[in-house]
Image (tube, rainbow, N blue to C red):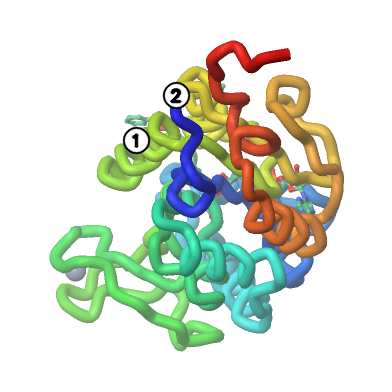
Amino acid sequence: MQSLPHHNRSLAVLTGAGISAESGVPTFRGPTGLWRNYHPEELATPHAFRRDPELVWAWYDWRRGLVGACRPNAAHHTLADMEQHSACLTLITQNVDGLHQLAGSSQLVELHGNLWRLRCTRGCRPPWEDRAVPLPAIPPRCPGCGALARPDVVWFGEPLPAAALEAAWSAARRCQVMLVIGTSALVQPPASLPLLAMEHGARVVEINPDPTPLSERVDEVIRQPAAAALPAWWRKYRRTTDPGLSWAKPAVRPEEPA
Ligand code: BV8
Ligand code: ZN
């Protein structure tokens, strides 16, 4: 395998709530993830919404208020810069906070939707953007047919958007390097993406201050917060003139004279 110059080696990046932690966004499993003593998994379900849409919307309104006051950090900005300088970068996020877009990332695969989009529970029209904080009415209603509106996110027990999932699978199969940033790797199907990338020979690097179920399986672990670790990783990556040595899986080289 001819080792590719680093600027046209395909990179895939998977992000989770941890990349937004330094922007002030509560992570799901961190101490700040709880709301009124509800675990996210209890509220982010179609069942919870059917049972009490006001309660679920109060939670999303609280999160929109919180996230709306947050700004992208150095890790988000580095990913936007990487997009500018990489021929082939696929940024796959589990986050619904919209901070990647705010940082300027456009090649983004949102696996779990977005807090700033609403959709009609009757499906009478495509999802629409609504950035009102707080929402004028809880629960909000569809401006077209007056039916209940819901956040345009994927709830537990719901399938992921097929196009986003396919884009993520193919990026994982194609990439030479996958960065896994700020995820506890517990929620499926996203947690399987790094495994798929490894099965296809990619080098997988985890950036997370804490261990995860992936840590002992990946090629490299950077135990630092993302806003510090990612800019440093990208500077080193770009400086690398001989990609085969440090980043991609060592190329199968013809026997080099000893
Ligand atoms: C589906 C949107 C099928 C909503 C979200 C049993 C076994 C295996 C799987 C299952 C099971 N039971 C059920 C399932 C499936 C389920 C699942 O995986 N459950 C888990 C809990 C076991 N998955 C589903 O239900 C999915 N759908 O399977 O559908 C289907 C198919 C066809 C037809 C019908 C059905 C849907 C899952 C999506 C749910 N929606 N979000 C909303 O946000 O309101 S998931 C949500 O939680 C996030 O999007 C994210 O995916 C997840 C949280 O994980 P992380 O982002 O990783 O965050 P976390 O807090 O956990 O960790 C933060 C990490 O950051 C930590 O490691 C920490 O150390 C680190 N960190 C902290 N600070 C920093 C940092 N890292 C770097 N820098 C820092 N500064
Ligand atoms: Zn409608």
Q: Amino acid at mark 1?
A: Ser
The percent position of residue 102, horizontal first and vertical second, equals: 52, 77
Tell me: 43 left or right of 132. Answer: right
Q: Quadrant of residue 225?
A: bottom right
Front-most of residues 240 and 141: 240
Rendered position, 65 above or below 207? below
Decide: is 145 above or below 113. Answer: below
Point out the image quarter for the N terminus: top left
Q: Residue at x 40, y 29 (%)?
A: 173
Residue denoted by label 1: 170
Q: Does any portion of residue 39 appear in the rendered image?
A: no
Amino acid, disc 2 = Met
Camera-nearest label, 2 or 1: 2
Residue 60 placement (x, y as % from top left): 55, 66
Could you tell me which residue is drawn at 78 percent across and 36 percent down? 221
Which residue is situated farthest in the front direction here? Answer: 257
Residue on which the image places disc 2: 1
Cα separation between marks 2 and 1: 20 Å
Q: How many marks?
A: 2
Q: Relative to the observer, which residue lies in front, 246 or 206?
A: 246
Query: Which tag, 2 or 1, sits closer to the chain's start?
Result: 2
Nearest to the observer: residue 44 or residue 81:
81
Picture residue at 47% right of the left edge, 44% below the top: 9
Ligand 2, seen in the image, is in the quarter at bottom left
251 left or right, relative to 212: left
Give the SS element for disc 2.
Answer: loop
Q: Quadrant of the C terminus?
A: top right
| Image position of 111 (left or right of 195) | left
On the question of residue 215 being in view, the answer is yes
